[in-house]
Image (cartoon, rainbow, N blue to C red):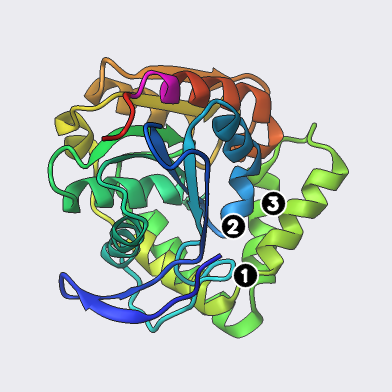
Amino acid sequence: MFFPRARQCSGVDVVDLPHSDKGPRTGAPIVVLLHGFPLDHAMWAPQARALEAAGVRVVVPDLRGFGKAPSTQGPGSMAAYAEDVLRLADRAGLRNFALAGFSMGGYVAFEVVRRAPPGRIAALALVDTRAEPDTDDARKGRYATIEKVRLDGVHVVADAMLQELLSSAAPAELREQVRATMMAQRPEGIVFALEAMATRPGSLETLQKFAGPVAIVVGEKDEITPPTAARLMMQSAPAATLTIVPRAAHLTTLEKADEVNEAMVAWARALTSSP
Ligand code: MLT
């Protein structure tokens, strides 16, 4: 893990993200995995292992305010998350790379695509995410949650989300592990993310213009970013692959790791090696 400094970049304060970076340094495809809310790098552990075993260089950061990454003052924005990711890519010497985003990580990935020079982002894996912005009701709900988190703490979000992240068939140990990850996050990071998600733009046009390979993965029973949202993304990226993971809710990467690994390894194998 590397540790952070703040600086200005493209008009936003940028922080150095702690991250792991494993796999071959030359000649291999590079995949950066962006986690969801209110989680951290650990939600990608099975995919990081599977991709590395397939010969891919795998970089997994904690996003600003989550895990070991520093928090900053709001208002939260996707621009800040995206500039942090681009700064990390610069520091790690990643000239071009593929991005996989889970849920909020997908929203960040779209913002990175908008901000990176054409071609720098070689491919996208969009896992349990959506390309539409928040509805007015969803946005109001985020601001109401911000007030509750400020008053009562992180458990407000952990309690509300646990039921939606995992299906009723998920093992008790996984449920406990995911709840512990959520409870380990800090209120400032959660508030920053809720503001960033509430104000994010729509990304269907970004996806339509994106030239690289796209893999879309979604849990059959995902109620946060449902299969209808995945099918809408498919309309903007007709060449994408779509994997609907049977009997899985939102957090497919941990609840149905093998199925997600298979889809992501196939996507990564199709990538050409980085120069
Ligand atoms: C996530 O899983 O990252 C978030 O729940 C996504 C969202 O709230 O839109």
Q: Which span is picked out in magenta?
A: 267-271
Amino acid type at mark 1: Gln
Side of 147 where 39 appears, left or right: right
For residue 107, side relative to residue 183 (left or right): left
Answer left or right for 253 relative to 224.
right
Crowd rating for badge 1 (residues with CA inside 10 Å; few <14, some 14–19, many 20+): many
Residue at 68%, 29% in the rendered image = 256
Residue 190: x %, y % from top left: 52, 70
- Is label 1 in contact with label 2 (beta carbons under 8 Å)? yes
Magenta highlight on residue 100: no
Q: CA distance from mark 1 to mark 2?
A: 7 Å
The image position of residue 133, as x and y in percent, is 30, 48
Q: Which mark is residue 39?
A: 2
Residue 185: mark in rendering = 1
Q: Main secondary structure of the magenta part?
A: helix
| Kind of residue indicated by mark 2 | Leu
Q: Nearer the viewer, residue 135 or 26?
A: 26
> Quick one: 253 or 232, which is closer to the camera?
253
The mark found on residue 162 in the picture is 3
For discs 3 and 1, the disc positioned in front in the rendered view: 1
The part of the image, by quadrant, that contains residue 25 is top left
- Disc 2: CA contacts within 10 A as few (<14), some (14-19) or many (>=20): many
> Within the magenta stretch, is there residue 268?
yes
Q: Is residue 207 left or right of residue 123?
A: left
Image label count: 3
